[in-house]
Amino acid sequence: MAYTIQGKTLWLRAHNFSFKKPAARHANTDPTKQEALYSTVMTTPPEDELILFVDGVHVTMATKITCQAPS
């Protein structure tokens, strides 16, 4: 089944959907809390669970908050 953009828009409005612009959040961390959590996990690891280390995302590759104005 195929719908047109206008048909989708009318359906969403009829079912009380609304447009909300996403809010950006900073990824600031507290080094003290992070160190406490790290040492807790490393000294008393949960049973039957793996501890994986992954690299962070490069700043330019991070998710960008964008929106398109409703028509």
Image: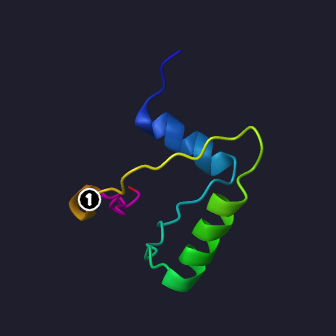
Viewed as shown, does residue 5 lie left or right of 17?
A: left
3 or 67, which lies in front?
67
Magenta region includes residue 51: no
Magenta region includes residue 68: yes
Q: Place residue 67 in its image quadrant.
A: bottom left
Whole-percent x, y for residue 65 in the image: 37, 64
Whether residue 26 can be seen here: yes
| Residue at x-position 61% and y-position 50% | 13
Viewed as shown, does residue 15 lie left or right of 32?
A: right
34 or 16, which lies in front?
34
| Residue at x-position 61% and y-position 69% | 39
| Residue at x-position 59% and y-position 80% | 33
Which residue does the numbered mark 1 point to in the structure image?
58
Badge 1 marks a residue whose secondary structure is loop
11 or 46, which lies in front?
46
Label 1 environment density (alpha carbons within 10 Å; few <14, some 14–19, many ≥20):
few
68 or 8, which lies in front?
68
Q: Read off the magenta span.
A: 62-70
